[in-house]
Image (tube, coloured by chain):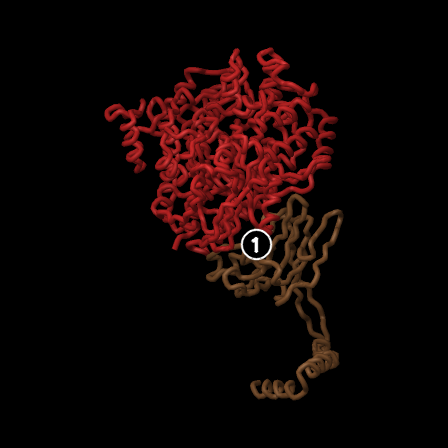
Chain colours: A red, B brown
């Protein structure tokens, strides 16, 4: 018997219309857990680097996390993996909502799609009955609208729908897949779904998911729930409200946006409005939010209510996710009413709420600076709000300039030429980042940004505080109940961390300490992505309910895999390395691991090089960021080393880790 | 005559305004009622279901009640504060018109048992897992006259009369005779 997982994947060939239920190897679960881990293994085995994002041979994998469908609070993530049209690397965008548990209850851990359907179709999974159905009547429909129409036509109000909107159908490079109150937004996974001619995957499941040691697992779940209650009642003192609690940043509940609006950049990530926030705006925005918000809502089996249903005047209700609250508002130099309104259209079209506003602001900057002209924007209104609405429509339809912009700022700048790349200034690995420009280099963030492969916003943050606390007393207070640390040394690093003097940034935490901190933070993100856990209850906030000490117990009692901290650390390292191996094979190198030039005003080139080299070495990668033969061997990934040598990526005798 | 005794009435107060549709109640219920306890999870087996239409702002947790072999002749809709509810949204029946409150394998009806078990729980598990307090457990003691608890003879007579009308006195008498022999 398989525990926590079902032991079966669905293999769908959209070109041939074939559907197979395939049993998986339990050994792979032990080595790579599930979700992202096993997704990465499948990509390595089946998608060689010659495969283009829009090739029928590209796979699109919807992987439910290993513990999804069990009572572990907040464990509801689907990891969508494919080759991204935007980065041409392996994307592993994650979505919450209700879809992953439903897939498990239907009897499957993953849906693996290949080929291309000649006509637009949707996939209907109802336990053992799986079929491809005509979706021509859904062509051009919004993602939310599609979900409504399908559940009605199937008469299945409890079915869960993951769908693309017009942006996905038009293969917009930053198109999302929308589901419930969540979406897989980064890396253009929606574009690949559209390219495959797949409008939606609809799931309804009524089967059991078993756990290996029921009493023990139940006890673990109770402990987590009690700790969530404790954390909700005891926010962390001394940090801003958005960092004090757990869950996704509580953007639907928190009305005070002073910090975001004055520290994040407006427009095309350039303009900082230092004295923007005042009483009048605070009152105005609060009224806007309260008049449009119908209810705070949660994902499956989670009490955190990080999302909300929003009803803008004259528009249908939609479900909003945290920071999309501000991305459109700030990119357009507008107000909250505009932001909440355009986000409705953007959700129906299905676009990433970080990339889309920046792409539009980028276009307007090119117009202002004469690189594009009025002729490129025929019929565009004069006002900023109208322009954003117009641009969004042209992009998702790929009309005129929209066709170029739909490829994201990196590729659009290349096509436009005339120095446009100067304006595509906020990218890492060809992907639009947080519109954040800071003064002093933060060495921890530098490494998180540079070496991150998810290109996801939450994944650059972690369980170590973002900045030192002012007084030693506050720091001592903080470490008192900081049991989530993997090692006591992290407490000492934090205790000694100061704003000024010897123990301040950028030279403290030291390079070695930064490696330890980043490795810990990254490890937790990778474990979440394999188990299907929401980062908001684990890798993202300070002092979360899930951590390196209770995760092994969850896996042991839940999946029946004998696990301890060391074995889990090794497993996470294994599939983390496999993600890098996929990308290495596709050409990713040290030169690609660069935060935007202007991300910090005060840069330290030598220190940054040292950070990168030391971290690579720490991870078992060579000077160019390529996993070495030796480290691959330690992880049982000899098959990767063999292929690296065969392809000339590593040479048989040149694999010693960099010093 | 006139002897008083107390009875505990268990109830769950549902505050639909607080529900945010996470379905933790369904998860807890299905785990608790698994055999062995907590060994499996499947909301389709849950004795509480959240009738959920986020876009219409409809969230109604409903508990499994009695089994009924036939569905209603007509189904009404209710409009409350501008929201239109199907009558089924408030109905606890395990009924042929929907797939709620039936074992998915056998189709046998399910019914909420307030998690009565040995050892006893402080409150039903769905209530414990509802961290937004949409479900509140209440116990109240009521005093009842012992004889009030007794069967109302007229009502029983009316029932038997209808059986006699339908099947004839002889058949009813035969069944009563057979029943009394058994007991």
- Of residues A658 and A504, the one drawn nearer to the viewer in this rendering: A658
Residue A232 seen in this snapshot: no
Mark 1 chain: B
Report the residue marked by disc 1.
B26
The residue at the point 59 percent across, 55 percent down is B126
Is A536 above or below relative to B183?
above
Residue A583 seen in this snapshot: yes
Which image quarter is the C terminus of chain A in?
A: top left
Q: Quadrant of residue A12?
A: top left
> Taking A207 as reference, is A358 left or right?
right
Residue B58 at x, y percent in the picture:
67, 48
- Of residues B110 and A245, the one drawn nearer to the viewer in this rendering: B110
Residue A518 at x, y percent in the picture:
44, 30
Residue farthest to the left, as pictured:
A653
Task: Tell how many labels.
Answer: 1
The residue at the point 69 percent across, 54 percent down is B86
> Taking A222 as reference, is A609 left or right?
left
Residue A633 at x, y percent in the picture:
28, 34
Q: Secondary structure at mark 1?
A: helix
- Of residues A36 and A177, the one drawn nearer to the viewer in this rendering: A177
Residue B124 at x, y percent in the picture:
59, 59
Is B90 above or below relative to A184?
below
Which image quarter is the N terminus of chain A in?
A: bottom left
């Amino acid at each position: 018997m398989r525990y926590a997982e079902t032991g079966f994947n669905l293999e769908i060939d959209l070109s041939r219309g074939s559907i197979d239920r395939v049993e998986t190897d339990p050994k792979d679960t032990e080595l790579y857990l599930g979700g992202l881990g096993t997704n990465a293994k499948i990509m390595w085995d089946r998608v060689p680097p010659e495969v283009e994002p829009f090739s029928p041979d590209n796979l699109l994998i919807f992987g439910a996390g290993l513990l999804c469908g069990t009572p572990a609070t907040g464990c509801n993530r689907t990891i969508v993996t494919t080759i991204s049209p935007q980065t041409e690397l392996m994307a592993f965008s994650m979505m919450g909502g209700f879809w992953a548990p439903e897939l498990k209850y239907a009897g499957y851990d993953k849906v693996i799609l290949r080929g291309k359907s000649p006509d637009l179709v949707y996939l209907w999974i109802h336990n053992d009955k799986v079929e491809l159905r005509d979706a021509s009547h859904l062509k051009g429909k919004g993602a939310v609208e599609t979900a409504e129409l399908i559940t009605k036509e199937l008469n299945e109000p409890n079915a869960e729908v993951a769908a693309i909107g017009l942006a996905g159908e038009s293969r917009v490079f930053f198109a999302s897949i929308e589901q419930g109150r969540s979406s897989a937004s980064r890396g253009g996974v929606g574009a690949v779904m559209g390219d495959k001619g797949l409008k939606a995957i609809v799931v309804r499941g009524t089967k059991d998911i078993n756990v290996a040691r029921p009493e023990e697992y139940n006890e673990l779940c109770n402990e987590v729930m009690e700790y969530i209650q404790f954390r909700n009642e005891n926010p962390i003192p001394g940090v801003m409200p958005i960092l004090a609690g757990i869950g996704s940043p509580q953007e639907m509940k928190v009305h005070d946006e002073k910090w975001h609006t004055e520290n994040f950049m407006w427009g095309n990530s350039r303009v900082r409005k230092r004295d923007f926030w005042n009483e009048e705006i605070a009152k105005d925005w609060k009224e806007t939010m309260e008049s449009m918000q119908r209810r705070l809502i949660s994902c499956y089996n989670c009490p955190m209510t990080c999302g909300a249903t929003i009803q803008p005047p004259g528009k249908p209700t939609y479900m909003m996710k945290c920071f999309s609250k501000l991305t459109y508002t700030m990119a357009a130099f507008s107000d909250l009413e505009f932001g909440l309104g355009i986000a409705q259209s953007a959700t129906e079209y299905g676009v990433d709420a970080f990339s889309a506003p920046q792409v539009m602001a980028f276009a307007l900057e090119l117009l202002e600076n004469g690189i594009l002209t009025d002729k490129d924007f025929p019929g565009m209104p004069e006002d900023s709000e109208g322009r954003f609405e117009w641009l969004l429509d042209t992009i998702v339809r790929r009309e005129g300039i929209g066709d170029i912009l739909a490829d994201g700022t990196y590729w659009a700048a290349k096509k436009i030429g005339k120095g446009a790349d100067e304006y595509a200034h906020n990218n890492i690995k060809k992907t639009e980042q947080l519109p954040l420009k800071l003064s002093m280099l933060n060495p921890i963030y530098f490494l998180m940004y540079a070496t991150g492969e998810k290109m996801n916003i939450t994944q650059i943050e972690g369980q170590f505080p973002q900045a030192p606390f002012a007084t030693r007393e506050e720091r001592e207070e903080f470490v008192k109940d900081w049991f989530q640390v993997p090692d006591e040394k992290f407490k000492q690093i934090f205790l000694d961390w100061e704003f000024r003097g010897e123990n301040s940034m950028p030279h403290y935490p030291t390079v070695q300490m930064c490696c330890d901190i980043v490795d810990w933070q990254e490890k937790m993100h990778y474990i979440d992505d394999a188990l299907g856990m929401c980062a908001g209850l684990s890798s993202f906030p300070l002092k979360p309910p899930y951590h390196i000490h209770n995760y092994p117990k969850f896996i042991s009692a839940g999946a029946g895999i004998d696990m301890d901290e060391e074995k889990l650390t090794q497993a996470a390292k294994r599939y983390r390395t496999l993600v890098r191996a996929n990308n290495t094979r596709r050409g990713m190198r040290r030169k690609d691991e660069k935060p935007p030039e202007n991300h910090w005003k005060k840069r330290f080139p030598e220190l940054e090089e040292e950070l990168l080299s030391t971290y690579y070495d720490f991870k078992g990668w060579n000077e160019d960021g390529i996993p070495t033969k030796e480290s691959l061997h330690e992880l049982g990934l000899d098959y990767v080393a063999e292929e690296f040598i065969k392809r000339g990526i590593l040479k048989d005798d040149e694999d010693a880790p960099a010093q | 005559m006139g002897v008083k005794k107390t009875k505990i009435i268990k109830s769950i107060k549902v505050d639909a305004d607080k529900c945010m549709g996470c379905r933790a109640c369904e998860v807890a219920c299905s785990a608790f009622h698994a055999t062995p306890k907590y060994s499996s999870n499947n909301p389709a087996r849950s004795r509480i279901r959240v009738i959920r239409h986020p876009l219409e702002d409809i969230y109604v947790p409903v508990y499994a009640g009695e089994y009924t072999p036939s569905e209603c002749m007509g189904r009404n809709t209710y409009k409350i504060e501008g929201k239109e509810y199907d009558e089924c949204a408030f109905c606890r029946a395990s009924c042929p018109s929907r797939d709620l409150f039936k074992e998915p394998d056998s189709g046998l009806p399910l019914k909420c048992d307030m998690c009565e078990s040995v050892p006893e729980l402080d409150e039903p598990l769905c209530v414990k897992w509802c961290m937004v307090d949409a479900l509140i457990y209440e116990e109240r003691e009521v005093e009842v006259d012992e004889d009030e608890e007794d069967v109302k003879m007229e009502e029983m007579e009316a029932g038997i009369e209808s059986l006699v009308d339908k099947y004839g006195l002889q058949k009813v008498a035969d069944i009563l005779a057979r029943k009394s022999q058994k007991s």
